[in-house]
Image (tube, rainbow, N blue to C red):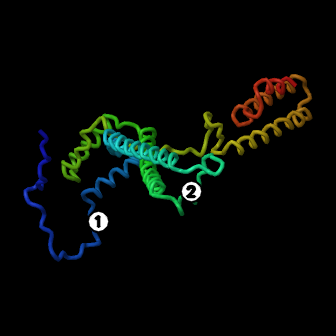
Amino acid sequence: MLVPPPLFHFPYGQPPHYLPHPTGPDLTKTTVVGYELLADKLAEGAKDDASEETSVVPIYRKFEKLNHRVLLHVQDEISELEDELRYLDECIAQTTPPGEDGHVMPASRRVEARYGGELHYRRTDCLGRIYMKLGQYNQALSSYSTMMKDLDPASADDIQAYHSWMERHAPVDKAESRFLEHRNDLLAIGRRKRSSSAGVAGATGVVGGAGPVESAALGLLLMLVLLILPLMAFAVIPGLLGRLFIIVLIGMGQAAAVTQTDLVGLMSEREWAKCGSM
C-alpha cells in the first residue's frame, strides 16, 4: 500500500512572521545568507585561484532514473503517433481514386491542404503532434547524453567537503540539502582548465600560444635563418674542424625547429630524411 508523503512542517515550529510593513534595509551592510551564501561558495569553488582545501566543488544530481523515465514515456508517445500515421497513410492510399491511366496519382500536399478530406486533416494534425514530440524527445536525449559525457561523477572527497561545509554554515534547510545523500546520482562541475600562453604544447603542436599556422610560419623563418648561418660562419671560421662543428650545431637547430613546430606535419618521415641527407 502506497503511503502519501508527509505534510510539510516548518522545521522551527512556526513559520516566520514577516512584518507587514518592513522598514527599508540598511544599504551600508552586505548580508549574504541562505541560497545566496551557498551560491557564492559554489562560485568561489569554480574559480581557478580557489584554494583546494577551502573550496567546495559544485555538485548536482543528474536524476538518471527520472531522465530515463521521461525518455521512455516520450518515446512511447512517439511510437503511438508513428502507428497512427501509418494507419492514416494506408487509409488514404487505399481510398484515393486512381488517375485516368489507372495509376496512382502523385501526392500533393498543396492539393490535400485545399481539397483534402477528413483523413488528410487528421494526418496533418498527426504530423504536427509528431513534430512537437520529436523536438521534446531529441532535446531531452541530446541534453542527457551531453551531460553524461561532459560531467564526471562526484568523488567521495568532494561530497564530504560539500557536506561538511553545509553542516558548519547551514545555509538552507536540511530537507533541501538531502540531495547529497544520493551519492551514486551526483555529478561534479570541475574547475575550468587553465589556458597557458607560454611554452610548448606537444599534443597540439602549439608553440608559445600560437596556432598551427603561426607555428609553421615561425618554423619556416627559423629554417631560413639556419640556412644562412653557415655562409656567415664560414666567412669567420676558416678551419675545417670549426666549420664541421658549426654544421653539426646548425643541423641540431634545424631538427629542433622541425620537431617543435608544425613543420613536421608538412612532409612524411621519408621526405624529411631525404631533405636531411642532401
Question: Is disc 2 surrounded by few (<14), some (14 to 19) or many (20+) residues within 10 Å?
Answer: few
- The total of numbered circles placed on residues is 2
In the picture, the quarter occupied by the C terminus is: top right
Q: Amino acid at mark 2?
A: Arg
Numbered label attached to residue 45: none
Where on the picture, by quarter, is residue 28? Answer: bottom left
Left or right: residue 65 compared with residue 83:
left
Numbered label attached to residue 109: 2
In the image, residue 8 sits, relative to residue 218, either above or below, namely below
Q: What residue do we see at 49% from left, 47% from top?
A: 89
Tell me the mark number nearer the camera, choosing from 2 and 1. Answer: 2
Question: From where the camera sits, is residue 258 visible?
Answer: yes
Question: From where the camera sits, is residue 190 visible?
Answer: no
Q: Amino acid at mark 1?
A: Thr
Disc 1 secondary structure class: loop
Q: What residue do we see at 84% from left, 24% from top?
A: 274
Q: Nearer the viewer, residue 87 or 66?
A: 87
Left or right: residue 81 compared with residue 96:
left
Disc 2 secondary structure class: helix
Q: What residue do we see at 76% from left, 43% from top?
A: 217
Residue for badge 1:
30
Q: Nearer the viewer, residue 52 or 97?
A: 97
Q: Nearer the viewer, residue 150 or 214?
A: 150
Query: Residue 191: where, in percent of width, then height?
Result: 43, 44
In the picture, the quarter occupied by the N terminus is: top left
Question: Is disc 1 surrounded by few (<14), some (14 to 19) or many (20+) residues within 10 Å?
Answer: few
The tag earlier along the polypeptide, 2 or 1, is 1
